[in-house]
Amino acid sequence: MPLIVDIHTHVYPPAYMEMLRGRKTIPYVHDPADSNEAPRLIILSSDDDPSIPIDQRGRPVDSSYFDINVKLTFMRRHGIHCSVISLANPWLDFLEPSEAQKWAQLINDDIEATCAQVNRAADPKGTLALHEKETLFAFGALPLSAPTPDIVVNEIKRLKSLPHLRGVIMGTSGLGNGLDDSRLDPIWAALEETQSLMFLHPHYGLPDEAFGGTEATNRYGHVLPLALGFPLETTIAVTRMLLAGVFDRFPRLKVLLAHSGGTLPFLAGRIESCIHHERKFVANGGDVVGPQRSVWDVLKTNIYLDAVVYGTAGLNAAMTASGTDRLLFGTDHPFFPPLDGKEGNEWPSVTTNYKAINDAFDTEDASVAAVLGGNAARILDLH
Ligand code: URA
Ligand code: ZN
């Protein structure tokens, strides 16, 4: 039985849930009038549609989102030994500038304490190997709306001193203007200097107009925002980083892309070709020097990809683009629960990913073991 590490698994710590309960604009949690009904989590812009009765907006949110024991049960059910937990979207992006630092410290300290407590209980003497127990590590959240970037830099450095933190999770808005914003340079520098992995995760998707407007978007539940909006958002964000030369200026930056890089592995050749045909970005009268490093080089040097893509075609693209040694198993728990909601059942969202990994590597057991856990243990120094 190989070591299994889940690097894409989220939590909303109870304090964060309470904060969302106190809000009336997205992101917020709404308690339905009927107390037998689960609270609703309203975080995506299309969820906040006034034509939908408030008790039906968004999605139900149960204890799997905030109770770590429920995650441990989920891990056990799916054979997962180790989870690298991260705050779920939209992280701390929406906070007032004066609140951001306080919340980042509170959430990161809370997550560190949870990891420490769970790990101590699983292995009081500290003698067991990773595959012999249940262990938690974490990616921290950043106070990106703080008044100045040095507050973010300080939090990146502080996270380095927390024993179970292994990097940061970040959305695509950066300091509010996307990830090609040069004001992010001190933050990239701090991530590079501390060799902290940045887990880049979508939240904002595409404007509802891309899907025909809010009503048309919501006609199909969350399918369009999650199946298409999320991966395209990631693709656009990382491509803007490439075009702005972020990987030229910070060649040792380490970025883990959610959902196998969105569509980046599939589109890398086209992106590279379009850059070549511009040299400088002169098409609209511009004079900006393009990126010096090739997309392929960045994919194999700076980028890691999760294996949360639910099919062999996507996995093959990811493997070809970045390499088997940079691909890491994940679940996206507690999102995408089984529709029947039965306790004790396996989650199709997880078994589909397990099957895709086994099918993609056929009989190459060493590659399967690397993707399921070996890569994560090495890259994130889990021990
Ligand atoms: N839906 C979300 O809002 N976030 C995820 O990470 C997955 C699904
Ligand atoms: Zn996720």
Image: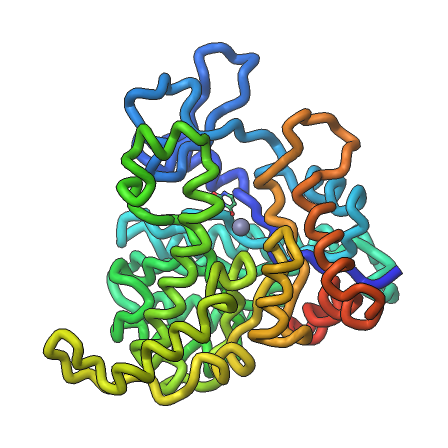
Q: Residue at x 70, y 75 (%)?
A: 378
User: In the image, 302: left or right of 9?
Assistant: left
User: In the image, 127: left or right of 285?
Assistant: right
Q: Residue at x 44, y 12 (%)?
A: 33
Q: Position of residue 217 (x, y in %)?
A: 36, 34
Between 348 and 188, the residue placed more toward the observer is 348
Quadrant position of residue 133? bottom right
Q: Residue at x 37, y 66 (%)?
A: 152
Its colouring scheme is rainbow
Placement of 320 over or under 4, stated as above or below: below
Q: Position of residue 126 (x, y in %)?
A: 83, 64
Between 107 and 177, the residue placed more toward the observer is 177
User: In the image, 130: left or right of 28?
Assistant: right
Q: Position of residue 209 (x, y in %)?
A: 27, 41
Q: Is residue 169 visible?
A: no
Q: Position of residue 105 (x, y in %)?
A: 45, 56
User: In the image, 31: left or right of 145?
Assistant: right
Q: Quadrant of the C terminus?
A: bottom right
Between 301 and 199, the residue placed more toward the observer is 301
Q: Residue at x 36, y 62 (%)?
A: 236
Placement of 17 over or under 3, stated as above or below: above
